[in-house]
Amino acid sequence: MCDSGQDKGWRSRLTCVVVGMVAWSLASGIVSAVQAGATVNQDFRLWSPVYVTVPLSSSFIGYLEANPRFGDDVSEIDQLLIRPAVGYKLTEHLSLWQGYAWIGNYQPRFTEEHRVFQQLLYSRKFSFVKLFSRSRLEERIIDHADGTAVRARTMLRVDVPLPQAPDWAIVVYDEIFVNLNSVGNGPGGGFDQNRFFLGMNHQVTAHFNIDLGYQMQTLNTRPSGLINQINHVILLQWFINL
């Protein structure tokens, strides 16, 4: 249970956080899927994003992401995201970012989306765990939508290094997306999607590491307010920190 002794305090609390994230994500997905009944569509997908982070000065950081996503049982490209950003270090562990994203949606026909986003990142490494959180606000200009859609998303990530192999870590994270407004011919307000990931991270070199694991993406793509799409994603993420 979540007892906290002098020696086990941090580890006990960490266990509670991880178990809570897993239980909440799986329960919310299962409950919504049951409510939606037979209307839930499912797909097997592969995402393989590359993230590059480079220091620009003592306070500023540059970032570039290229994120190809393959769907329909990994038979065709579904999306491509290109996302540059610039960050400013507020403290050793906290940074504020401004960025832009171009999104090409290829299925069932090609459409584009342009996003401007702001985000706050927190990252801290302890002796036995690394914590990361990201809170992002997106202003989305979507083809054929009557106005700008605004979406908030928050992610909490936990990396737990393996005692016998410190270059390897168990990774669990959850990210929830909420639409803050409704747009004609575009997203409706309320719950948009949730992404739950469980996998491994390998620190290959001081400047390069990889995530590999499973992500369950549950989406609400219709005004029903219920989950009607579940994507089972093999996620291979490449992190380059220069």
Image (cartoon, helix red, strand yellow):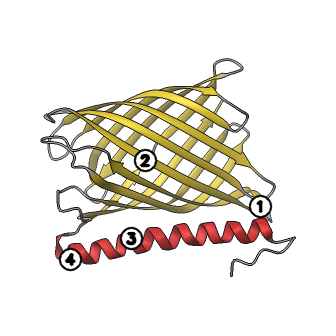
Q: Which mark is residue 28?
A: 3
Q: Position of residue 180 (x, y in %)?
A: 31, 45
Mark 2 or 1 closer to N-term? 2
Element on which disc 1 rests: strand
Q: Which mark is residue 153?
A: 2
How packed mark 4 is, by other alpha carbons closer than 10 Å (few <14, some 14-19, many 20 or more), is: few
Q: Is residue 199 above or below residue 46?
A: below
Element on which disc 3 rests: helix
The residue identified by callout 1 is 165
**Viewer-side label of 3, 1:** 3
**Viewer-side label of 3, 4:** 3
Mark 3 or 2 closer to N-term? 3
**Viewer-side label of 4, 2:** 2
Q: Position of residue 188 (x, y in %)?
A: 21, 49
Q: Is residue 69 above or below residue 63?
A: below
Distance in Å between CA atoms under marks 3 and 1: 33 Å
